[in-house]
């Protein structure tokens, strides 16, 4: 039996300030960097060359890692997109708010205008703010009631973004159009848009009934509703005409919009949320990336992602602002091979390990679900590049950014983030977060603390039940794994050997679950 001292660090419950943050109009130092968050989709811990990827070259990400900090123990808050993104943008754990699970393309906006977001942080600091690419956090006031042919409101301008060019949800969900500042981009008046997640529109083909029309990609599970660009989707839509995206051009569209934004704002401090569609399904990269990996379309999509990274860095360089731009490259959740399309991801993966040998993957409670690449690049500030194994969680993004933008005075501005984690993110402190909580697709929570990982007993199927061949990690029994030094051994459940420790961690998890702003000061 092993005892654990839970009082080694002092508990700090800083009361959150939410939107009452100080700093409007304050004179701020002119050394504040631009901030670019490159947020990949379903990019696994092992999917970049600098994290051990085989079969695909990622020179642009590698270069950021080589000249910055590459973290080996960084975590998204959840193992799926919507809850992860919700937490990253608001600093609130997703289980504190209903309706933060994987959102439909016609979901109402999940973050409400009253909430304080990381975009608000930057606006308050006088930055210009913009979002590009995958959104997946809902739009409009009411689910299913958006006016896709007019103004969608509320939209990103109401939660702090000056400019936005986004996809409402995911590339596999309708509507398959870009939305620019709350209106469908390149709107085609000859083809009014209708969207439903309940029923098809009269006379419209579906993947289920018209498989012969799936000329670009066939589905392997799900994704058999409306057909756009020869690919079946989730949900039904009608219309769109020339505004409909072509999947092979999505990376180009969002990257060039982002590059334009950098060019237009090079002189002013800006915050850019750049959320790629890569490497989410449907994986249908541009022709010029086809065959650039040994892994088929999924590897080629990683290559395309790396190209986007390179274009953004190049634009920053050309504007002469790379030196004082903070770039963070990370992912919303872990990897999946077959996520619903017959794209060869499983068959062609070879000896590449998308999770970098971690157990589980997207959706799961094991490390493969939430341990993600995390690269921090800021030449003006980070003078000693290196690899860091301190514990990092995306829950701290808002507060770390508030510290960097100079609006917080070191106070917590989000419900659950910890401003002190800025030291870890910028490499000044190797210790990392004292704990991290992660949420799986079925809301099982796990707690990483003191070199251990505790997975609460909740039950559920051992494998993701609807298609992806991924272990969920769900169990009716408590699980305890050793995580010392960032190494994880999730094959060896030692819960039975350490009942006291299990109880202690269970209690800690309950306290975190029930206490907003729970943090343990360890420095
Ligand atoms: C699942 C989809 C999957 C993906 C996921 C969300 C099916 C069968 N599967 O429901 O393809 O879209 O949702 O992924 O529909 S996430 O990265 O945006 O969370
Ligand atoms: Ca995702």
Image: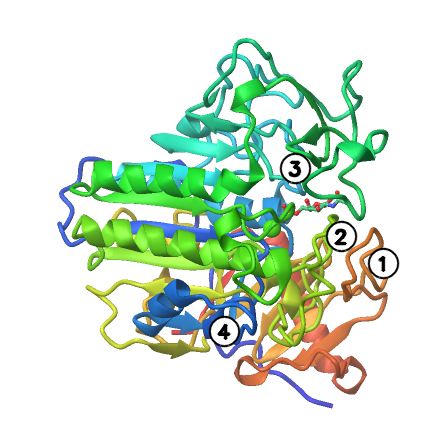
At mark 1, the secondary structure is loop
Look at the picture and state if 105 lies above or below 151: below
The answer to which of 179 and 360 lies nearer the viewer is: 179
Q: Are marks 1 and 3 in contact (CB under 8 Å)?
A: no
For the C terminus, which image quadrant?
bottom left
Disc number at residue 339?
Answer: none
Q: Is mark 4 within 8 Å of ligand 2?
A: no
Q: Earlier in the sequence, mark 3 or mark 4?
A: 4
Disc number at residue 103?
Answer: 3
Q: Distance from label 4 to label 1 (Cα)?
A: 31 Å
Q: Is mark 3 within 8 Å of ligand 1?
A: no
Q: Distance from label 1 to label 3 (Cα)?
A: 21 Å
At mark 3, the secondary structure is loop
Residue 479 is situated, as x and y percent measured from the top left of the image, at: 76, 74
Q: Which residue is mark 1?
A: 460
Residue 345 is situated, as x and y percent measured from the top left of the image, at: 69, 60
Q: Are marks 4 and 1 in contact (CB under 8 Å)?
A: no
Q: Nearer the viewer, mark 3 or mark 4?
A: 4
Q: Residue placed at 44% from the left, 30% from the top?
A: 156
At mark 2, the secondary structure is loop
Q: Residue placed at 27% from the left, 42% from the top?
A: 262
């Amino acid at each position: 039996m092993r005892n654990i001292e839970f009082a080694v660090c002092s508990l700090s419950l800083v009361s959150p300030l939410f939107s009452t943050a100080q700093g409007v109009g304050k004179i701020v130092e002119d050394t504040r960097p631009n901030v670019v968050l490159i947020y990949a989709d379903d990019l696994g811990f092992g999917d970049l060359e600098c994290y051990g990827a085989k079969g695909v070259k990622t020179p642009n990400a590698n270069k950021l890692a080589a000249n910055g900090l590459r973290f080996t123990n960084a975590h998204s808050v959840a193992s799926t997109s919507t809850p992860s993104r919700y937490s990253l943008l608001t600093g609130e754990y997703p289980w504190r708010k209903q309706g933060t699970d994987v959102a439909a393309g016609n979901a109402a906006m999940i973050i409400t205008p009253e909430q304080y977001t990381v975009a608000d942080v930057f606006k308050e600091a006088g930055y210009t703010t913009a979002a590009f690419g995958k959104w997946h956090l809902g739009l409009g006031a009411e689910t299913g009631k958006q006016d896709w042919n007019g103004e969608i409101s509320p939209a990103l301008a109401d939660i702090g973004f000056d400019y936005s060019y986004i996809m409402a949800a995911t590339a596999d969900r309708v509507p398959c159009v870009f939305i620019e500042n709350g209106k469908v981009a390149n709107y085609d008046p000859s083809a009014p848009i209708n969207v439903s997640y309940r029923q098809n529109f009269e006379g419209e083909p579906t993947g289920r009934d018209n498989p012969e029309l799936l000329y670009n990609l066939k589905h392997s599970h799900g994704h058999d509703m409306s057909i756009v660009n020869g690919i079946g989707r989730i949900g039904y839509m009608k219309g769109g005409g020339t505004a409909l995206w072509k999947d092979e051009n999505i990376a180009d569209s969002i990257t060039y919009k982002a590059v334009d934004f950098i060019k237009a704002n090079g002189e002013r401090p800006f915050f850019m949320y750049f959320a790629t569609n890569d490497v989410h399904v449907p994986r249908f990269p541009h022709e010029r990336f086809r065959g650039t990996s040994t892994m088929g379309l999924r590897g080629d999509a990683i290559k395309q992602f790396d190209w986007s990274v390179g274009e953004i860095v190049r634009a920053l360089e050309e504007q002469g602002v790379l030196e004082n731009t903070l770039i963070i490259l990370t992912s919303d959740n872990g990897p999946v091979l077959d996520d619903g399309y017959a794209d060869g991801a499983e068959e062609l993966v070879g000896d590449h390990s998308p999770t970098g040998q971690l157990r589980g993957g997207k959706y799961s409670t094991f490390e493969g679900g939430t341990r993600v690449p995390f690269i921090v690049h800021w030449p003006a500030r980070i003078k000693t590049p290196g690899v860091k194994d301190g514990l990092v969680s995306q829950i701290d993004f808002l507060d770390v950014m508030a510290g960097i933008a100079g609006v917080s005075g070191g106070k917590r501005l989000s419900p659950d983030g910890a401003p002190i984690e800025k030291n870890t993110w910028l490499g000044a402190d190797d210790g990392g977060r004292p704990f991290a909580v992660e949420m799986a697709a079925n809301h099982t929570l796990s707690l990483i603390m003191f070199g251990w990982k505790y997975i609460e007993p909740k039950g559920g199927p051992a494998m993701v039940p609807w298609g992806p061949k991924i272990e969920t990690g769900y169990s009716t029994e408590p699980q305890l794994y050793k995580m010392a030094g960032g190494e994880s051994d999730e094959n060896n459940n030692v819960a039975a050997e350490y009942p006291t420790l299990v109880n202690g961690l269970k209690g800690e998890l309950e306290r975190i679950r029930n206490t907003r702003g729970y943090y343990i000061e360890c420095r």
